[in-house]
Image (tube, grey):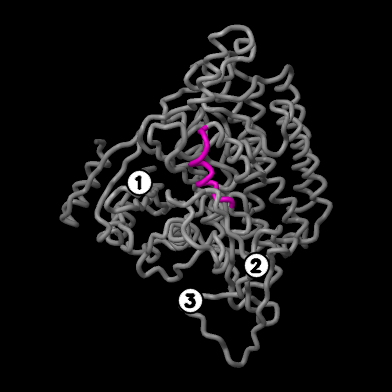
Amino acid sequence: MNEIQKIIQTDLSQIFNTELKISESFGDTVIEFPKEIVLQVMKHLKTRHHFDFLLDICAVDYPTRQKRFEVVYHLYAPSTKGRLRLKTQVGEGEAVESITSVWKGADWFEREAFDLFGVVFRNHPNLRRILTHQDFVGHPLRKDYDANHQQSTTRVEAAWFKSNDGFKEDPNKNLVPINIGPSHPATHGTLRVMAQLDGEIIERCNVEIGYLHRCFDKMAETHFYNQIIPYTDRLNYCSAPMNNVGFCKAIERMMGIEIPPKAVAMRVILAELSRVIDHLVCIGTNAVDIGAMTVFWYLFEQRENVYTLFEKLCGARLTVGLTRIGGMAYPNPPNWEQECLETVKGIKKSVEELDRLLTENKIWIKRTQNTGKISAEDAIAYGWTGPCLRACGVNLDLRKAEPYYGYDQLDFDVPIGTNGDNYDRYLVRMEEMRQSLKIVETLCKNMPSGDYTIRDRDVVLPEKKDVWGNIEGLMNHFMLVIKGVRPPVGEIYDSTEAANGELGFYCVSDGGPKPYRLKVRPPCFSIYQAFPEMMKGQYIADAVATLGTLNIVAGELDR
């Protein structure tokens, strides 16, 4: 037990006078405690131990247990860089206290656990389905729910607002209800914004999600670990390799695998190129939504050039499956690093052209400055991470705060904003692209030698020449395909700094070839929660601009 664990155990035991179970799981600190004190424990950890961030809430189903469900909370303290996983057991028909009064961001996470598992959160202000539709019957992530049982609806839910949101309608105003999306071009076919307008001013706002929900978690439970990698591509499909890297990194840590230096360098290069093209998509589509079509063509040309680099690695462009547990899927083709450097030169030129087109453009400034603002305090309360959080003035980047893959050995800066508005989110992404390109250049010029993957026959498929050339290689291939990768029993939460913020994977292994439970912590989920509050008092045109700078990617949001 480390020092932080001892302090927290002593502190909580004395205050709550109850037995706590504190343990470690693959380096993670885990605290189990009775559900009756959930709210008090969370308040205490936030105020006394500065766990300012609620990163995730999820549930795990154990049908044979007396108390069927395990509710799992992930907290983060930026001042000490400490992480905690807290768990409590809840039986069928029982309820656990909501913690929405401690963190605003608990709202959607608790609704998700209610929707997918049926866990009830007492005193939640709005406990209703969030990812499945209003006519859905049952809870799809329960172990006794058939993964093949799909349900559809033909009924559209009417515009809905919270009855307890404190809104008092002025009888002298004739508020007009309006739907923006999901078929509106600015919502990209996947988001629905419901608003009440006084003229062009948004008086009240709410959102509906789930239009692209595929139940990634359920699919993960029915597939082998390496078979899940193509599904991770479909999370944030604007930067697919980052999802591959995040998932494989979590499972490798669980299995105690250290990938070769060349695989590390390639993963960082792919992650930073993905960050760049994700930002290019964000700024380009945002500019189109606002009315600046020219910018779109400048940026998407460079995105296609990066896809050509991906294609030379694996044959695919958008959804790539570039990693495997143990390293990379394929070796680099000849001269790939040099081609990457040439591509970086072109991107740099386009970024500077973009800078000249937009940064001091009067129309762009008027549409983005002082619109879609959020304070640092509110952003933290909602669990924001990534460039949107840094635009509020909060210096938090996992590549610096909790370095992985040698980021602490690389020379790059983390841009920070001040106003937390649409303009600052644009500026932060602009500078992040420059810094990412700097990282890519460094690694391409100093690519480590050696293998692109480990050579463990229980983890990685043998080379094709061995499969075709000798019986040992053929049998190794056969056994791994049939048996699959098998991490040890236990659970882990691991995260990376993706394009939109902290991308986390919480995996529970029962020792078999498929995850018992796999939960994604998507950056967009926390960010989009704040949108209704941000839009109150804003023009309806500002809603379109803000949606673009928040960079809500529905594949990541809904999973």
The correct choice, above or below, for 473 with respect to 397 in the image is above
- Identified at 51% across, 47% down, the residue is 218
User: In the image, what residue type sits under mark 2?
Assistant: Thr
Q: How far apart are marks 3 and 1 (CA)?
A: 31 Å
Which element type, helix, strand or loop, lies under badge 3?
A: loop
Rendering quarter of residue 291: bottom right
CB under 8 Å between discs 3 and 1: no
> The disc labelled 1 sits on which kind of residue?
Arg
Q: Residue at x 59, y 54 (%)?
A: 213
Q: Residue at x 67, y 27 (%)?
A: 441
Residue at label 3? Answer: 165
Viewer-nearest residue: 149 or 395: 149
Q: Of the residues shown, which amino acid type is indicated by label 3?
A: Asp
SS of the residue under disc 2: loop
**Residue 154 got which mark?**
2
Which region is colored magenta? 214-225
In the rendered structure, which disc, 2 or 3, sits on the residue that comes first in sequence? 2
